[in-house]
Each structure stands twice: as structure tokens, then as C-alpha cells.
Image (cartoon, grey):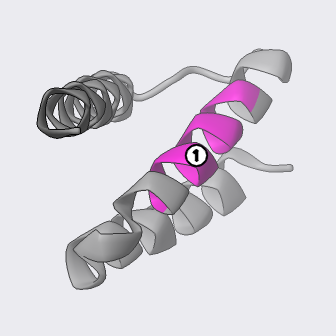
Amino acid sequence: MALEEFRIQIAMLLDAISNQPEDMHEAQESLREKLAEMRALGLPLPEDLVNLEDYLEDEFEQEEHDKGEMG
């Protein structure tokens, strides 16, 4: 898959994250998969997307932690 195709798919994921924040975990998983594909192909990873992946992971962990404290 060409780098441009990855960029298009990732742009679509980012749109999904901003338009449907309730589905953020699903979009996070899709982003993780796309970045893993790029890594496997030896393509350069955009730093901002790697940072976004880290941020989303931190947010998800915080949500899980907060749920654990409530339950």
C-alpha cells in the first residue's frame, strides 16, 4: 500500500474521531493497526500520529482507571 493511501485512511480515521467521539476507542484501534502496517512496511511514521496514538492510549487508560474507581 502506498504512503498516500495510508494518509487518506488515517485522515478518515481522524475525521471519525472528531465527528464521533463516542467511537474513539474503535478509531484508536484502527489507527494503531494502520501505524503497525506502516511499521511492517518500513514506511516513515508521522510523529504527530505517533503522538496521537500515545495520547489516545493514555486517555483510554485513564477512562478505565476512572471506571474502576467508580465500580
Q: Is residue 36 above or below residue 71?
A: above
Q: Which residues are magenta?
A: 27-36
- Which residue is pictured at 58% across the width and 36% down the height? 32
- Which residue is pictured at 40% across the width and 71% down the height? 23
Q: Is residue 58 above or below residue 12?
A: above
Where on the picture, by quarter, is residue 54? Answer: top left
Numbered label tally: 1
Q: In terms of depth relative to the viewer, which is nearer, 60 or 27?
A: 60
Q: Is residue 27 above or below residue 64?
A: below
- Horizontal side of residue 17 vs 11, given as left or right: left
Q: Main secondary structure of the magenta part?
A: helix
Residue linked to disc 1: 29
- Which residue is pictured at 22% across the width and 73% down the height? 18
The amino acid on which the numbered mark 1 sits, given as a three-letter code, is Glu
- Which residue is pictured at 78% across the width and 49% down the height? 2
Q: Is residue 62 magenta?
A: no
Q: Is residue 3 above or below residue 19?
A: above
**Helix, strand, or loop for circle 1?**
helix
Where on the picture, by quarter, is residue 46? Answer: top left
Quadrant including the C terminus:
top left
